[in-house]
Image (spheres, rainbow, N blue to C red):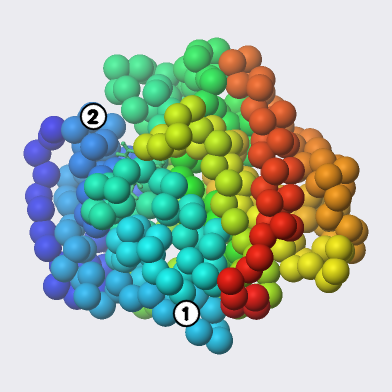
C-alpha cells in the first residue's frame, strides 16, 4: 500500500471540501471517500487505487442511514448498510427486487460492513483491472489497451462495450435501481442536486477510466425509488457459478404491472452482462399491451440482447441472459405481491 493522508469528515460540507481533488469519478482519482471500505481498501492493497487522501465519511452515518417508505416512494440513505435494507420489512414487502438484490450480494459479513453508496460505486472484477502487473488496461492505465479482449473474458460484458474496455459492472443493487427508475440525491461543494441513477455510470466512450459523472467532492447522500404499482410485483433473479458469495454471471431485475393477463407496465434491468447497470427499454416496449406468455417473454428477451457483442469465452452469455430474463418475467407474473402499488 502506498502512503496516503487520512481525514475524518464531521459533516457533509466538510466532507465535500476535503473531498475536492483531481479525477473524481475516474479510476485514478487522488481523493477517495471511505464508507465501509470493502472495495476501497481491497483495491488500495492491490495497488489498483492509489489515492493520496482518504476521507472517512462513516461519521456521517447517523444523518444518512435512514430507510423511509411512504406515498412518495422509497428513500434510502447512502450510508445505510446493505444488510439493514435487505432485511427491512417495508422493502421486503413493497420493493422485493431491491431487498433481493442486496440479500443475494456478497456475504453476511460484507453486507454488515458495506454501504449502499459504496455498493453502486464498486469497481469491476475484471482480472486484468485488478491485477496491476498487467500493463494493458485502459481503465487502470489509460491508453494502454485492453488485455481482456484477447484474454480470458468468460465473465466480461457483452452489452454497452467498445473496443477500449469490455469489463463488466459487477453490482446487484444497481440493477434493481435502474429497473425501478431510481433517482440519486447528491451533495457537493456546489450544494445539493438530484439526478437519475441511470446517469451516474458513464459508458466507455473510448475513455473507460472515467467511470461516473460525479463532480469533484460530490457525495451520494440518498437513493429514491419513485412510487409505482409495479414495485410490489418486482423481483431480482441472480445466476452465478455457485449458490452464494459470488458475483452474477447473469441477472435480471423486473417489475410488472398487469391488467389481467396483459402487461400494462414493465421495467427490465440486466446484470452480469453489461459495462454499466443496464436497462432495456426496448424489451419493455415489446411487452407493453401484450399478454405475458412465454413466447412474448422470449421475444422481449431477444430484443434485449440484439446489440450483444461477444469476445470468445463469453459467447455463452447472450443466451444465458435471454433465459434469465424469460424466467424472471414468468416468475414475476406468478408472484403474489405482498403490497400492490407501493
Ligand atoms: C469478496 C467480495 C464479494 C462481493 N460480492 C458482491 C456481490 O455478489 N454483489 C455485489 O453487488 N457486490 C459484491 N461485493 C461488493 C461489495 O458489495 C462492495 O465492496 C461494497 O458494497 C462497497 O461498499 P463500501 O461501503 O464498503 O464502499 P467503500 O469501499 O468504502 O467505497 C467504494 C467506493 O465508493 C466511493 N464511495 C463510497 N461511498 C460513497 C458516497 N456516499 N458518495 C460518493 N462516493 C462514495 C469510495 O470513494 C470508493 O471509491 C463483494 C465484495 C467482496 C470483497
Mark 2 or 1: in front is 1
Regarding mark 1 in the picture, which secondary structure is present there? strand
Other-residue count near label 2 (Cα within 10 Å), few / some / many at <14 / 14–19 / ≥20: some
Q: Residue at x 58, y 42 (%)?
A: 251
> Compared with residue 133, is residue 273 higher up or lower down, i.e. above or below?
below
Q: Residue at x 35, y 17 (%)?
A: 134
Q: Position of residue 184 (x, y in %)?
A: 48, 68
Relative to residue 314, is residue 333 drawn left or right? Answer: right
Q: Residue at x 46, y 74 (%)?
A: 90
Quarter of the image that includes the N terminus: top left
Q: Measure how far apart labels 2 and 1 are at the Cα level.
A: 39 Å
Relative to residue 245, is residue 282 drawn left or right? Answer: right
Instruction: Confirm whether residue 58 shows in the render.
Output: yes
Q: Position of residue 16 (x, y in %)?
A: 26, 68
Other-residue count near label 1 (Cα within 10 Å), few / some / many at <14 / 14–19 / ≥20: some
Relative to residue 250, is residue 132 drawn left or right? Answer: left
Q: Is 70 or 60 nearer to us in this picture? A: 70
Instruction: Confirm whether residue 207 shows in the render.
Output: no
> Compared with residue 306, is residue 179 higher up or lower down, i.e. above or below?
below
> Compared with residue 129, is residue 331 higher up or lower down, i.e. above or below?
below
Q: Position of residue 309 (x, y in %)?
A: 69, 27
Q: Residue at x 85, y 69 (%)?
A: 260
Q: Which residue is mark 1?
A: 69
Q: Is 239 or 57 nearer to us in this picture? A: 239
Q: Residue extending furthest bottom?
A: 71
Q: Which residue is mark 2?
A: 46
Q: Position of residue 93 (x, y in %)?
A: 52, 70
> Contact, CB < 8 Å: mark 2 with mark 1?
no
Looking at the image, is mark 2 or mark 1 earlier in the sequence? Answer: 2
Regarding mark 2 in the picture, which secondary structure is present there? loop
Label placed on residue 109: none
Amino acid at each position: 500500500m502506498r502512503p496516503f493522508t487520512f481525514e475524518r469528515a464531521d459533516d457533509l460540507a466538510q466532507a465535500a471540501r476535503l473531498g475536492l481533488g483531481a479525477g473524481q469519478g475516474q479510476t485514478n482519482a487522488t481523493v477517495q471517500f471511505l464508507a465501509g471500505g470493502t472495495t476501497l481498501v481491497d483495491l488500495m492493497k492491490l495497488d489498483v487505487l492509489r489515492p493520496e487522501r482518504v476521507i472517512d465519511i462513516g461519521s456521517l452515518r447517523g444523518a444518512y442511514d435512514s430507510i423511509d417508505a411512504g406515498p412518495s416512494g422509497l428513500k434510502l440513505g447512502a450510508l445505510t448498510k446493505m444488510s439493514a435494507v435487505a432485511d427491512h420489512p417495508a422493502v421486503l414487502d413493497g420493493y422485493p427486487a431491491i431487498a433481493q438484490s442486496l440479500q443475494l450480494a456478497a456475504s453476511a459479513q460484507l453486507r454488515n460492513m458495506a454501504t449502499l453508496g459504496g455498493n453502486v460505486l464498486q469497481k469491476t472484477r475484471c482480472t486484468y483491472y485488478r491485477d496491476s502487473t498487467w500493463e494493458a488496461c485502459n481503465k487502470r492505465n489509460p491508453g494502454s489497451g485492453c488485455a481482456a479482449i484477447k484474454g480470458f473474458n468468460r465473465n466480461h460484458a457483452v452489452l454497452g462495450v467498445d473496443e477500449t474496455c469490455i469489463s463488466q459492472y459487477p453490482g446487484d443493487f444497481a440493477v434493481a435501481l435502474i429497473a425501478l427508475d431510481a433517482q440519486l440525491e447528491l451533495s457537493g461543494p456546489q450544494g445539493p442536486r438530484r439526478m437519475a441513477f441511470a446517469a451516474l455510470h458513464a459508458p466507455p466512450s473510448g475513455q473507460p477510466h472515467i467511470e461516473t459523472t460525479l463532480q469533484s467532492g460530490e457525495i451520494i447522500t440518498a437513493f429514491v425509488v419513485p412510487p409505482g404499482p409495479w414495485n410490489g410485483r418486482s423481483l431480482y433473479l441472480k445466476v452465478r457459478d455457485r449458490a452464494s458469495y459470488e458475483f452474477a454471471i447473469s441477472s435480471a431485475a423486473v417489475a410488472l404491472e398487469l391488467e389481467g393477463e396483459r402487461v400494462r407496465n414493465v421495467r427490465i434491468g440486466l446484470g452480469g452482462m453489461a459495462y454499466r447497470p443496464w436497462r432495456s427499454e426496448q424489451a419493455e416496449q415489446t411487452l407493453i399491451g401484450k399478454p405475458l406468455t412465454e413466447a412474448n417473454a422470449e421475444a422481449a428477451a431477444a430484443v434485449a440482447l440484439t446489440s450483444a457483442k461477444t469476445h470468445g469465452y463469453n459467447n455463452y452469455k447472450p443466451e444465458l441472459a435471454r433465459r434469465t430474463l424469460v424466467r424472471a418475467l414468468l416468475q414475476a407474473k406468478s408472484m403474489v405481491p405482498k403490497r400492490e402499488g407501493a
